[in-house]
């Protein structure tokens, strides 16, 4: 029993940084945070993947990521006669904007799924898709057990993501999409990403509804 207790104490008191995931920007170059997505089986379907990253405190790592994404959407809007689809996605707990980890490749596959759906449904030209991945530090540990213990700390980080920078990003992306009436913007979040979306947009949407009264807001 004494040996087991000693081993358990040693496991629980290992240096917390041993499995720590770096707090950093993962996609600093334009060719990393904006890329084309193609499907060999549907050559007419086109898409882009853009990444916007936030630090531990809900601040932009580099505002240029947002500026370039806004200009990309504006350009695609001008090129596409039937409008575009903009899908903004905020990942959840245990993920980040590392392109070699789970969430970014999974989001890219979702964009490919939408491209395929568009190609099958469109009579002429499929609508162009712009996927915008919102990255934050939802993953702070690479160790399985230690990762499970990060729930409360990462929930606090998600709460800090409810910031002016996040609100600016959401509304600028929606506004530039709306420059073309035929285009559609959807903002979604998974897990703690849903918390970020809801708490960021909720107060603004409530204000708009109250201001516009019975007519509501489009």
Image (spheres, helix red, strand yellow):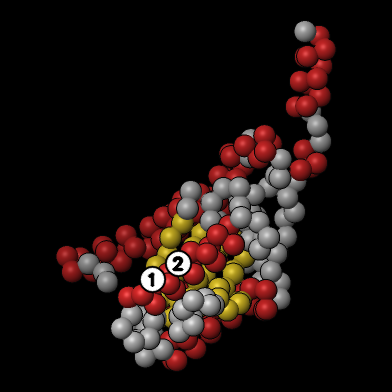
Local SS, label 1: helix
- Who's the residue at 64% across and 73% down the image? 33
Q: Quadrant of residue 59?
A: bottom right
- Residue 57 seen by the camera: no
**Residue 131 location in percent, x, y?**
50, 71
Left or right side of 119 for 66: right
- Who's the residue at 46% across and 78% down the image? 42
Furthest-left residue in this view: 214
Left or right side of 31 for 43: left
- Residue 11 seen by the camera: yes
**Residue 116 location in percent, x, y?**
43, 72
- Who's the residue at 50% across and 49% down the image? 192
Quadrant occupied by the N terminus: top right
Local SS, label 2: helix
Callout 2 crowding tier (Cα within 10 Å): few <14, some 14–19, many ≥20: few
Q: Identify the disc placed on residue 6.
A: none
Q: Identify the disc placed on residue 117.
A: 1
Q: Is residue 135 above or below residue 19?
A: below
**Residue 93 location in percent, x, y?**
57, 48
Quadrant occupied by the C terminus: bottom left
Marks 2 and 1: in contact by CB < 8 Å? yes
Q: Is residue 138 above or below residue 15?
A: below
Q: Quadrant of residue 61?
A: bottom right
Residue 96 or 45: which is nearer the viewer? 45
Q: Identify the disc placed on residue 113.
A: 2
Left or right side of 191 for 27: right
């Amino acid at each position: 029993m004494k040996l087991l207790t000693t081993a358990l104490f040693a496991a629980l008191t290992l240096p917390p940084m041993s499995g720590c995931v770096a707090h950093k920007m993962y996609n600093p170059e334009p060719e990393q945070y904006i890329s084309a997505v193609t499907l060999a089986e549907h050559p007419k379907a086109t898409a882009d993947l853009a990444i916007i990253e936030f630090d531990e405190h809900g601040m932009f790592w580099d505002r240029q990521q947002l500026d370039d994404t806004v200009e990309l959407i504006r350009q695609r809007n001008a090129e596409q006669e039937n409008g575009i689809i903009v899908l903004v996605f905020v990942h959840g707990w245990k993920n980040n904007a590392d392109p070699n980890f789970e969430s970014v490749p999974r989001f890219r596959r979702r964009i490919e799924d939408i491209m395929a759906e568009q190609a099958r449904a469109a009579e002429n030209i499929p609508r162009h898709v712009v996927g915008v991945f919102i990255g934050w530090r939802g993953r702070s540990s690479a160790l399985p057990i230690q990762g499970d213990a990060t729930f409360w700390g990462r929930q606090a980080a998600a709460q800090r993501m409810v910031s002016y920078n996040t609100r600016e990003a959401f509304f600028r992306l929606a506004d530039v999409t709306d420059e073309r009436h035929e285009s559609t913007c959807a903002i979604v979040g998974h897990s703690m990403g849903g918390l970020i979306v809801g708490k960021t947009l909720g107060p603004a949407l409530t204000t708009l509804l109250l201001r516009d009264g019975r007519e509501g807001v489009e």
